[in-house]
Amino acid sequence: MKKRRRVSQKSKEREKLDMGFSGDNRIGFVLALLSSAFIGASFIIKKKGLRRAAAASGVRAGVGGYSYLLEPLWWLGMITMIVGEVANFVAYAFAPAVLVTPLGALSIIVSAILAHFILKERLHQLGILGCVMCIAGSVVIVIHAPQEHPITSVQEIWSMATQPAFLLYMASVTVLVFILVFHFAPRCGHTNVLIFTGICSLMGSLSVMSVKALGTSIKLTFEGKNQLFYPETWFFMLVVATCVITQMNYLNKALDTFNTAIVSPIYYVMFTTLTILASVIMFKDWDDQSGGAIVTEICGFIVVVSGTILLHATKDFERSSSFRGGYTPVSPSLSNRLYSGNGDLLKHEEEDETSTEEICLRSQ
């Protein structure tokens, strides 16, 4: 009888972990939603500011103009973006990366909807379907998200970061990054989009783990458990700075070489997948979940990825039609887009100024 009671109690606890929402998870979820809303809106506000500045000065930011720095609307968009990034940073301190990271795709939906009504940039029917898919996948992920395990000190996070499985992951990432940077990047970095985006995604997965560790340390410090005396806190801060700088450097190279409509979905898929993998290894996010819940989360993530790719494919279709004056195939074959003799084939004649900022910001 005692064994049966223990089994039933464990099954009830597991059901709560699978379907329930703890207080920390709820806070992280709300912060992630607010982050996506603010960041998505910031793209539109800044674009309005850029257009207004270009109309006043006659020089666009894309060709070297800096008149937007005197435009209040652009600064309003910048402040909105900073608020969103702070909310995203704090969200990692409350909820697992498995929950927070995929919700970043919602900022694309916010910017697409606002662009349709404010900037009069038409949202294609397939784009609407992509938005619905992103929302549906996000709901599935949220419902089955794992609970955040309580952490009492930064030393506890350090012990997670130094466990053999995560050390192996970090060593693998470091080796792969060095190979990509010193061997493949000089040879085919400007012809294969997977090289630069691969470096960004690998470094991004480590930066998110460090951001989560740093955010948790700051959260505990505000709760009265000062973590600033521990050297591990400052080490995580150093890792965050190193990873983010490297990540931004190669992401800018990717965006400068290839079409944003190609870089953005590929980077989102690789970055989010590697981040979830790193979080599962380091924080054991899936240890207390059933196999069904894990499979459901993966399916929800696939739906979000599919919706994101569909949204960007729609943007590519609209731009191709507007540039060429009618219906033409959206692009060359996938193999040509991923690997081409020169980067010019993969670039548009003109990129919106906010396109580069959008994907750069989401990587954080």
Image (spheres, helix red, strand yellow):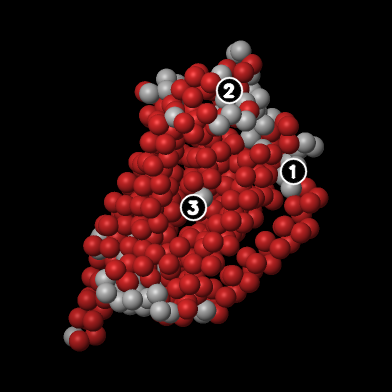
The residue lying furthest to the bottom in this view is 2
* SS category of the residue bearing label 2: loop
Q: Is residue 245 left or right of residue 224?
A: right
Q: Quadrant of residue 265?
A: top right
User: Is residue 283 visible in this depiction of the protein?
Assistant: yes
According to the picture, the residue beneath numbered tag 3 turns out to be 364
Residue 309 at x, y percent in the picture: 52, 38
Q: Quadrant of residue 266?
A: top right
Q: Give the residue displayed 32% in from the left and 57% down from the top.
A: 28
Q: Give the residue displayed 38% in from the left and 23% down from the top.
A: 118
Q: Quadrant of residue 133?
A: top left
Residue 88 at x, y percent in the picture: 39, 53
According to the picture, the residue beneath numbered tag 1 turns out to be 190
Mark before the other along the chain sequence, 2 or 1:
2
Q: Amino acid at mark 2?
A: Val
Q: Is residue 253 left or right of residue 52?
A: right
From the viewer's perspective, is residue 221 above or below residue 86? below
Q: Amino acid at mark 3?
A: Gln
Mark before the other along the chain sequence, 1 or 3:
1
Q: Amino acid at mark 1?
A: His
User: Is residue 11 visible in this depiction of the protein?
Assistant: no
* SS category of the residue bearing label 1: loop
Q: Give the residue displayed 48% in from the left and 60% down from the top.
A: 208
Q: Which mark is residue 59?
A: 2
Q: Give the residue displayed 51% in from the left and 73% down from the top.
A: 235
